[in-house]
Amino acid sequence: MMMPIQQMLFQVQVPSNSILLPTIEFNLELVPNDDSKTFEILSDHDVGYGQSYTMNISFKSEYDKNEYGNRFRATHCVAEADDTAVELVDSHGCSINKKLMTDFVYKNGYATAKIPSMFRFPNSKTMKLECKLSICQEIQPSCDRKMDDPIIAEVEDAEMIAHLLGMDDESVQSAVTDPMQSVDEKPTKSTSTIVHVLDRREIPLRNDVTTKPGNGITSAECFASDEILSLYAILFGLALALALSVVLNIWCCLCCRKKKAEKEKRRKSYLFQNECWITGNPTVEITKDVNRKLF
């Protein structure tokens, strides 16, 4: 005897604001904003200290990108090094300090935020940038912070990380201690990248890679930048002006010396003639003297 098949329904509660399937994965990359050739020979994980970058977060799968589009939000972003983390984006998806990193902008399946000046930790050149993301059923603004939500006061410049790590104030410790723990229970996915921050002197000179036609051999030729060429032109112009001024001064000195010598010569000639002048008729005077002696 066959038992009637009963249809069993299970009720599952899903948060109304965010969901996240376990198969969804994200990519995180840093793209230099400088359009020069400096970064062409750097590896993917090398970044220049003080340079401007854009952080891009996107879906790994094209299917997920088409399925969810812009319906995802970054809920936390941190920079970590030597077991210390500094929060960049809070649980509301808002930047802690826009001089370190701006708010994310969501467009065409990408979340982008600018890092105006690449920073680093005082005792480590290698750091990890990590973000947590949530898939949202209801699209919220890019930054979902309310007016009365507490935020950390902004610091003067991008070196605030070094100051944060050295300060003991409790208000600062809240941003440094375990920032990846979310204040709510939204399901999240993490994506991260590890970067090596190079000093300015470690960033190689830019070069252009040219391909010789016909043989397919590439050769690297080093080209000076327009700024360096302009500097060379200015220095050459200054050197030329200095050389011309020196020559002109020497010529003027010689001319003045020559004129002065001519004046001295004329003056001496005039004085010599005055000393040797004889007044009267010398022949008559001599005749008179002779006559006096005879008579």
Image (cartoon, helix red, strand yellow):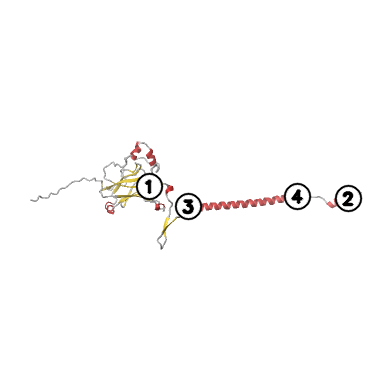
The residue pinned by badge 1 equals 196
Q: Nearer the viewer, residue 99 or 77?
A: 77
Q: Earlier in the sequence, mark 2 or mark 1?
A: 1
Q: Amino acid at mark 4?
A: Phe
User: Are the residues tagged 2 and 3 within 8 Å (C-beta)?
Assistant: no
Residue at 54 percent of width and 52 percent of height: 239
Can residue 162 be seen here? The reply is yes
The location of residue 220, given as percent across then percent down, is: 43, 56
Q: Nearer the viewer, residue 11 or 219?
A: 219
Q: Amino acid at mark 3?
A: Ile
Where 164 sits versus 135, above or below?
above
The location of residue 171, given as percent across then percent down, is: 34, 37
User: Are the residues tagged 4 and 3 within 8 Å (C-beta)?
Assistant: no
The residue pinned by badge 4 equals 272
Which residue appears farthest toward the left when viewing the image? 1
Q: Earlier in the sequence, mark 1 or mark 3?
A: 1
Label 1: state its secondary structure.
strand
Q: CA distance from mark 1 to mark 4?
A: 90 Å
The location of residue 249, given as percent across then percent down, is: 60, 51
Q: Earlier in the sequence, mark 1 or mark 4?
A: 1
Q: Which mark is residue 290?
A: 2
Mark 3 neighbour class, 10 Å CA radius: few under 14, some 14 to 19, many 20 or more = few
Residue at 75 percent of width and 49 percent of height: 272
In front of the other: label 2 or label 3? Answer: 3
Mark 2 neighbour class, 10 Å CA radius: few under 14, some 14 to 19, many 20 or more = few
In front of the other: label 4 or label 3? Answer: 3
